Amino acid sequence: MELWKCIGFGLILMFWALSCEATSRSLQDASMYGRYEQWMTRYGRVYSDANEKENRFKIFKENVAFIESSNKM
């Protein structure tokens, strides 16, 4: 019986940790999207449709990651 309690507790901890990571990721994406919107406004970027905007957002995130990794050196 004690073993089942330990397994159950371990599973609960695992699911909690995974949900925290997912929440953190979604908050980071929301923050990054805010930065993207500010960048678009600042530089007057307007895209023809949502698909192009989403593709440009992906490129924006990659560029931010590259710049931040370069600045760490």
Image (cartoon, grey):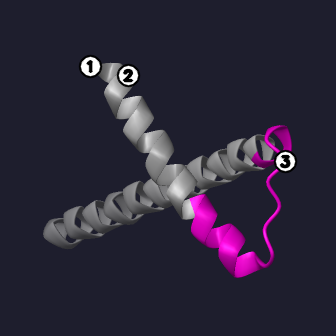
Q: Is residue 55 left or right of residue 63?
A: right
User: Mark 1 or 3 closer to N-term?
Assistant: 3
What residue type is disc 1 on?
A: Met
Three-letter amino acid code of the residue under disc 2: Asn
Image coordinates of residue 24 in percent, x first then y, are: 53, 50
Along the horizontal axis of the image, is 16 left or right of 50? left
Label 2 residue SS: helix
At 35% from the left and 57% from the top, the residue drawn is 13
Q: Quadrant of the C terminus?
A: top left
Q: CA distance from mark 1 to mark 3?
A: 31 Å
Segment colored magenta: 40-57
Q: Which image quadrant is residue 48 in?
A: bottom right
Q: Is residue 42 magenta?
A: yes
Local SS, label 3: loop
Q: CA distance from mark 3 to mark 2?
A: 26 Å
Residue found 84% across the figure and 47% down from its top: 44
Quadrant, the N terminus = bottom left
Q: Position of residue 40 (x, y in %)?
A: 78, 48
Residue 56 position, x and y percent, is 61, 63
Rendered location of residue 30, percent (x, y): 68, 53
Q: Which residue is mark 2?
A: 71
Which residue is labeled 1 in the image?
A: 73
Left or right, 15 with respect to 36, comes to: left
Label tally: 3
Q: Main secondary structure of the magenta part?
A: helix
Q: Specify the label residue 44 is tagged with.
A: 3
Of residue 3 and residue 34, the one placed in the foreground of this image is 34
Cα gap from disc 1 to disc 2, whole angstroms: 5 Å
Q: Are marks 3 and 2 in contact (CB under 8 Å)?
A: no
Between 26 and 6, the residue placed more toward the observer is 26
